Image (spheres, grey):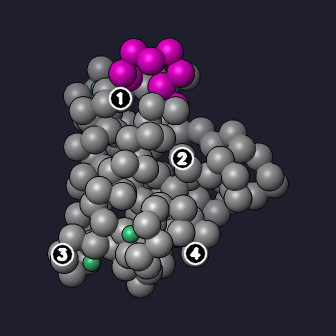
Amino acid sequence: MKNSSLAIVLALALGTPLAAVAQGGTTAVELTQEHFDQLDVDKDGQVSRAEYQQYMEGAFGRLDADGNGRITKQEAARVLTPEQFAAVDADGSSDISEAEFMDRVMRDFDRQDRDKDGRLAYH
Ligand SMILES: [Ca+2]
Ligand SMILES: [Ca+2]
Ligand SMILES: [Ca+2]
């Protein structure tokens, strides 16, 4: 599954699988207004890097059910396919550290931020 990184992020952040989005071979995974509203904490119509980072740190905490600082396959099973899990587990240790998680999601932010102004705007 290529270019599914935003789907991974959203699945992790929102705690819901986005299997439907990944169907049909499309790579155009878009934030819905609902997703966007959850990320846009100060409701200025844009998701800043800080808002995104804060949200993702919270998402990591929610997924790390036993609070040991690592997301295991079991903890992620609800939201990630094995392929998505492997993509985030950069060092192949079979669990996702907070560093691996944040590295992945912040890279996704930068990729989505096409005009590089540090914000994502809903369109
Ligand atoms: Ca905002
Ligand atoms: Ca854990
Ligand atoms: Ca790892």
Mark 1 beta carbon near ligand 1 (under 8 Å)? yes
Task: Check disc 2 and report the residue beneath it.
Answer: 6
Q: Residue furthest front?
A: 91
Amino acid on which the number 4 mark rests in the picture: Pro
- Tell me the CA gap for discs 2 and 3: 24 Å
Q: How far across and down, in percent of the image, does residue 43 sit?
A: 28, 26
Please indicate, yes or no, whether residue 18 appears anywhere in the rendered image: yes
SS at mark 3 in the image = loop
Q: At 43% across and 25% down in the image, what residue appears?
A: 120
Residue 13 placement, left or right of 20: left
Is residue 34 in sight in this rendering? no
Give the mark, 4 or 2, whose residue is nearer the N terminus.
2
Q: Position of residue 30 (x, y in %)?
A: 59, 38
Q: Nearer the viewer, mark 1 or mark 4?
A: 4
Mark 3: which amino acid? Gly
- Tell me the residue that label 4 is attached to: 82
Residue at image point 44% right, 40% down: 107
Question: Mark 3 or 1 closer to N-term?
Answer: 1
Distance between mark 3 and mark 4 Cα atoms: 21 Å
Q: Nearer the viewer, mark 1 or mark 2?
A: 2
